[in-house]
Image (spheres, rainbow, N blue to C red):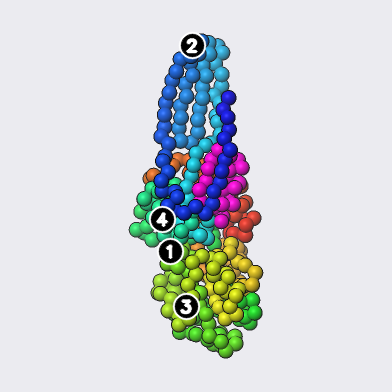
Amino acid sequence: MLTESRASHRVGRTVADLTGRRRGSARRGCSVAPTGLIHLAVYVPLFLFCVSCREVGHAQSPTVSPLAGRLTFAGSTTLQPLAHEIGTAYTAAHPEVILDIAAGGSVVGIEAVHDGTVDIGMASRSLEPAEAEGIEQHQVAVDVIAIVVHQSNPVEDISLARLRDVYLGRITDWSDLGGQEEAILVVVRGMNSGTRGAFDKIVLGEMEPSAPQLEPAVAASDVAALVAGHPNAIGYLGFGHLKLGTKVIAVDGVVPTGETARDGLYPVVRPLLFLTGPLTHPLAYGFIAFALGEEGQGVVVDRGWVPAH
């Protein structure tokens, strides 16, 4: 009888914690018991078959054991909480699989898959051609990048062109956008952020933000805290990180929703991707199939994201 071990599901590990892991290799073993019974065990990365052969005419049917192993993740801070939620559902069905889900930003996730230091990378933007070489991309959701201001801000809408001008320092006062005569505090994400990469590409044409009052934020939660705490701030957040105290404004007259994102009406959207590479453990593909299947996509919808399919 196989004894089930208790699963663990760890989130928020550093990338350094993950790079020291050793991968299991396939093993074959055959032994003859004193009673004359032959036990043939074939171990493969995705599952374990155990076949017991008794006397002729009394052979038993193969028994498949639960999936077991350890998968490591790193990358997008936007995708990390969604990966955790999908992982919770996955390990409920496969309790002997251990998931270590770290963050670090999309660039970190892409590089870690190339290096083979993690099984699954996470990216919250499209990959550049050089980054995509040798990597398989699995879109798990569509993320809507919402433009957020303080809840007391009277501005309800901004054009994509004027949003660009705010981040490039060409518009510096809220009065030019229909608000109060106050200097605009412009909040940006760090360079490793997939949200930053997507925003810069879609809104700024890959130009560098250069507003006179530029406030950097490490994580999405920092953006939310800065905008919620400063009446003159503007920032951008993925749908999964919208918080109380912030207000979402329309872009070019279109309010960001799942429907306007799928229809292509809302302009600031990006893919959320799981990434695999040549050194990815085969067990990872079972997790990705789960994430893209009915149950995984149900988690995407339940958590307020836009499903990939």
* Residue 251 in sight: no
Residues rendered magenta in the picture: 81-101
- Indicate yes or no whether the magenta region holds residue 193: no
- Tell me the SS state at disc 2: loop
Q: Which residue is mark 2?
A: 34
Disc 1 + disc 4, Cβ < 8 Å: no
Q: Which residue is mark 1?
A: 192
Disc 1 + disc 2, Cβ < 8 Å: no
In which quadrant will I find the C terminus?
A: bottom right
Residue 209 image offset from top left, x and y in percent: 43, 76
- Indicate yes or no whether the magenta region holds residue 93: yes
Q: Measure the C-alpha gap from mark 3 to mark 2.
A: 76 Å
Q: Amino acid at mark 4?
A: Ile
User: Looking at the image, is mark 4 or mark 3 earlier in the sequence?
Assistant: 4
Q: Which residue is mark 4?
A: 110
Tell me the mark number nearer the camera, choosing from 1 and 4: 1
